[in-house]
Amino acid sequence: MDLKAAKAKLDHVINIGRVEMYKPIQIAEVLHVARTSGEVVLSDVETYRIKSRRWRDDVTLALFNKRSTSSARFQDDVWNETAVPPAAMVGLGAANASSGVVENYIYSFITEKNEELTAARSVIANLRSVSEVENLLKVFESATLTSSADRLYEILATAIFKTELSRTTYTISVDRPRNSRRAATVDEFIDLVATSPMPLVVDRLGHTNAADAGLDIWTNFGVLINVKRRPLTSELLDQIVNDTPIGSLHIVCLEIERDATTRLKELRANGLRISITTKNDLMRSIQTLLSDRDSSSAFVNTLVGSFDKEFPMARTLGNFAASRGYSPNLLTGIWKRPENYG
């Protein structure tokens, strides 16, 4: 297969890739191994079909803290005739052999897909005003970041709660009277919290789980926190309540619709313990935190730490590209990226 046809195959896989771009990375890593070690024979897919999954995962874990969980059959589709078969790999490998230009080309798209996250991290690390937060939330509403917007809203709420609690002396403890009857197995873990008062703690679960029962932020004091980056309607409120098995409930939303306010009164009248934080509430809290130097520093540090944990690629991609010697400036000829791409 000639280089033009091989590149067309590669471009197709890149164009349909998601943010993590597992398949393009898998192609790049096979080309990298072929260029640097000669461990594979590009014309023989069996020399890299299985091994390339590990090479790809090593990179995606370092860059995104994720690995592909797709079936082996789906992962192997990357070497099919409709994707990048061995004949195309031979052509790409020949072009890549001397300078790694094809690897560089592939990773330039991955870097581009994450440029907005890199810019967002810079804003967070240098946060000075509520308006900057407002603008950042608007940026995350763009089509390329919409899947990350919910996570950013959770991170923001959690950072506020954590920082505010860190400035208090609130504690929680379990009251177990001396003459109470011991409950063998249960007391094994009750002993962990019954000895002395503990500071109140909140934090994100750190991952999305279909079985998390509506819990987005956990606490050690019995409140379940559910975060929705949308207006709270009566229907959504009932859904959240039904998904919350035990404990008091706190909901973080954008705003409260009138029908939800009515429904909230009904639920509280029936004994449910529910409280609400809106986006306006969050912004007021941020304003207060940023107005105090110590609180501002703690809040920004917490926010940056959480952002880096959720979106590690915002800082890892640059280091990775530098370690490999990749740069858009080195892309020439047919590998030169159009300035208005995408």
Image (cartoon, grey):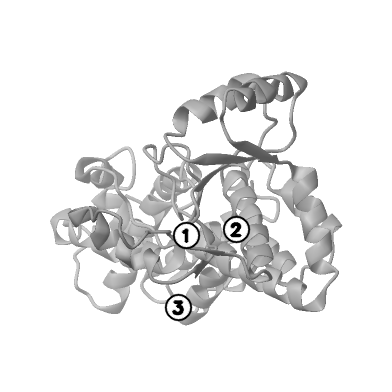
Place of residue 229 in the rendered image (x, y in percent of width and height, measured from the top left): 65, 39
Using the image, tell me which numbered label, if any, was put on residue 328.
none
Mark 1, residue position: 106
Closer to the chain start, of discs 3 and 2, is 2
| Residue 30 makes an appearance in the image | no
The amino acid sitting under disc 1 is Ile
For mark 2, give the secondary structure. helix
Q: Residues within 10 Å of mark 2 (few under 14, many from 20)?
A: some
Q: Residues within 10 Å of mark 1 (few under 14, many from 20)?
A: some
Place of residue 78 in the rendered image (x, y in percent of width and height, measured from the top left): 30, 46
Closer to the chain start, of discs 1 and 3, is 1
Residue lying at 71% horizontally and 66% vertically, measured from the top left: 124
The image quarter in which residue 24 lies: bottom left
For mark 1, give the secondary structure. helix
Mark 2, residue position: 112
User: Position of 149 compared to 29: left or right?
Assistant: right
The amino acid sitting under disc 2 is Glu
